[in-house]
């Protein structure tokens, strides 16, 4: 697990829970396509929690006025890498859905996951006093 300073205890707690949810999501995807189940492993409540946490962590840093480059602190940089990987996984899920149905709630959860990781990265930089970098357009 990502080593985070004590000032990022909230981020650490969320990342740990996301690891658990990723494990559950993987199990869901490994399940036979038409196998019966009582309810989705990743449900609406998971998506709603991600949305709530996006709002909560977005409130912990100043509003964005421009695009930002991934990076800053080590913690934020690693969260940006996780965001990139989760976005790639989301694209793979969409492609899979064309071949065999993927639960729409799982697709929504994957979409919100990358947004939460972005919010966590910005909140981490802000908590650590690291300014975001804007891209240069004059290169």
Image (tube, grey):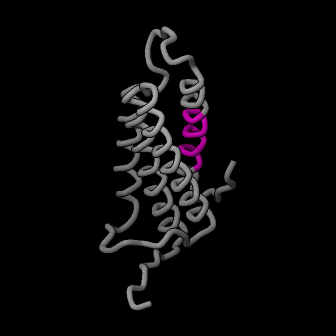
Say whether residue 46 is left or right of residue 22: left
Give x and y (percent) for residue 92: 50, 42
Q: Nearer the viewer, residue 4 or 7?
A: 4
Say whether residue 24 is left or right of residue 38: right
Q: What residue is drawn where x is 39% and y is 64%? A: 61
Q: Which residue is outermost to the front? A: 99
Q: What residue is drawn where x is 52% and y is 74%? A: 130
Residue 10 appears in the figure: no
Say whether residue 74 is left or right of residue 66: right
Q: What residue is drawn where x is 48% and y is 10%? A: 37
Give x and y (percent) for residue 139: 44, 90
Q: What is the tally of numbered marks visible in this picture?
A: 0
Q: What residue is drawn where x is 55% and y is 40%? A: 18
Asked whether residue 18 is drawn in magenta, I would say yes
Asked whether residue 98 is drawn in magenta, I would say no
* Magenta segment: 12-22
Residue 66 appears in the figure: yes
Give x and y (percent) for residue 27: 59, 25
Q: Nearer the viewer, residue 137 or 41?
A: 137
Give x and y (percent) for residue 54: 38, 49
Q: Which residue is outermost to the bottom? A: 138
Q: Most prominent secondary structure in the magenta stretch?
A: helix
Q: Nearer the viewer, residue 100 or 78?
A: 100
- Asked where in the image residue 60 lies, by quadrant, the reply is bottom left
């Amino acid at each position: 697990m990502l080593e985070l300073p004590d000032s990022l205890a909230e981020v650490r707690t969320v990342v740990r829970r996301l690891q658990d949810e990723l494990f559950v999501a993987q199990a869901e995807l490994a399940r036979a396509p038409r196998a019966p189940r009582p309810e989705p492993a990743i449900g609406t409540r998971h998506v709603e929690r991600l949305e709530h946490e996006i709002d909560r962590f977005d409130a912990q840093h100043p509003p964005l006025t421009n695009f930002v480059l991934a990076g800053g602190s080590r913690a934020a940089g690693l969260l940006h890498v996780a965001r990139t990987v989760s976005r790639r996984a989301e694209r793979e899920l969409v492609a899979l859905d064309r071949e065999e149905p993927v639960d729409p709630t799982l697709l929504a959860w994957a979409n919100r996951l990358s947004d939460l990781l972005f919010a966590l990265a910005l909140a981490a930089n802000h908590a650590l006093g690291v300014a975001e970098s804007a891209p240069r357009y004059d290169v």
